[in-house]
Image (cartoon, helix red, strand yellow):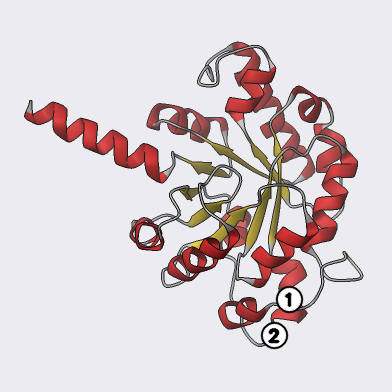
Amino acid sequence: MRENRLRTLFADKKLALNGWVSMGNSLLAEVLSHSGYDAVTVDLQHGLFSIEAAVSILQAISTTGAVPLARCSENSLGEINKLLDAGAYGIICPLVNTREDAEQFVRACHYSPRGGRSYGPARGVLYGGADYFTHANRTVLTLAMIETKLGLANAEAIMSVPDLDGIFIGPADLAIDMGLAPDNWKDKQVTDAIQSLVALGAQLGKYIGIFAGTVEMAQRMKEYGLDMVAPGTDIQLLRAEAQARIAALR
């Protein structure tokens, strides 16, 4: 089966940079994937497109060296199975608040006896290889999102779930749940939470990723020791570069 390079980078203690597709355009996803990211995530939670569109986006990412990931819209076995069958090499699951949520998520991502995933990886076999079934459970990456105060309080229980590879921090929703503005990542409540999750991940040997909406934030997260950083969505990158060029020419 094709290597999941994110696991190799994690083993080598190297930061992974993760692109983020929210516009639903396969050409844009292909361009983004050719830009040097280690992985690119197809976002079905906030992306304005359906799972049908996600298939062509995963195909576009797969023409490059970036690892194709997907964020499911919810903790649903049906949707997670479809995304994995379509060739996603990892799933980021939103709003995992309890150990039970994490167990449900992990079960959806793995074949028996480690889980309850149904067999039918039509495109997964094309991308992963003929021996997909043999190695899928050890290759697909499972990241549960911690983005609420409840999830933060239950972080150790969540990260202790067998076969959960790690977590992906949602700092905007975490800030909102703390009574802050979504972009207030510098508040001590948020930075303390992030650093505590990084420390816990190191203690438990778990993968820790985060979304960072700005370069400044991404650089700080790199300093904190995150394993994966997503430095903005396709929309944010397009807007920022357009504004920078316009400002330079005005």
Q: Does residue 1 show up?
A: no
> Up-down: is 182 above or below 122?
above
Query: In the image, residue 125 lies at what x, y percent?
Result: 64, 81
Which residue is located at x 48 percent, y 28 percent?
220
Which residue is located at x 83 percent, y 46 percent?
102
Q: Observer-nearest residue: 128 or 81? A: 81
Query: In the image, residue 39 lies at what x, y percent?
Result: 50, 56
- Quarter of the image with the C terminus in it: top left
Q: Observer-nearest residue: 169 or 50? A: 50
Q: Observer-nearest residue: 218 or 29? A: 29
Q: Are marks 2 and 1 in contact (CB under 8 Å)?
A: yes
Residue 2 in the figure: left or right of residue 140: left
Residue 13 in the figure: left or right of residue 75: left
> Up-down: is 195 above or below 69?
above
Q: Quadrant of residue 199?
A: top right
- Quarter of the image with the N terminus in it: bottom right
Query: In the image, residue 76 lies at what x, y percent?
Result: 77, 53
Q: Secondary structure at mark 2?
A: loop
Q: Residues within 10 Å of mark 1 (few under 14, many from 20)?
A: some
Q: Secondary structure at mark 1?
A: helix
> Up-down: is 171 above or below 112?
above
Residue 200 in the figure: left or right of residue 170: right
Estimate the spatial distance between the alpha carbons at disc 2 and disc 1, rounded to whole Å. 7 Å
Say which residue label 2 marks. 131
Which residue is located at x 52 percent, y 46 percent?
47
The number of numbered discs placed on residues in the rendered structure image is 2
Kind of residue sitting beneath label 2: Asp
Say which residue label 1 marks. 135
Q: Residues within 10 Å of mark 2 (few under 14, many from 20)?
A: few
Which label belongs to residue 244?
none
Kind of residue sitting beneath label 1: His
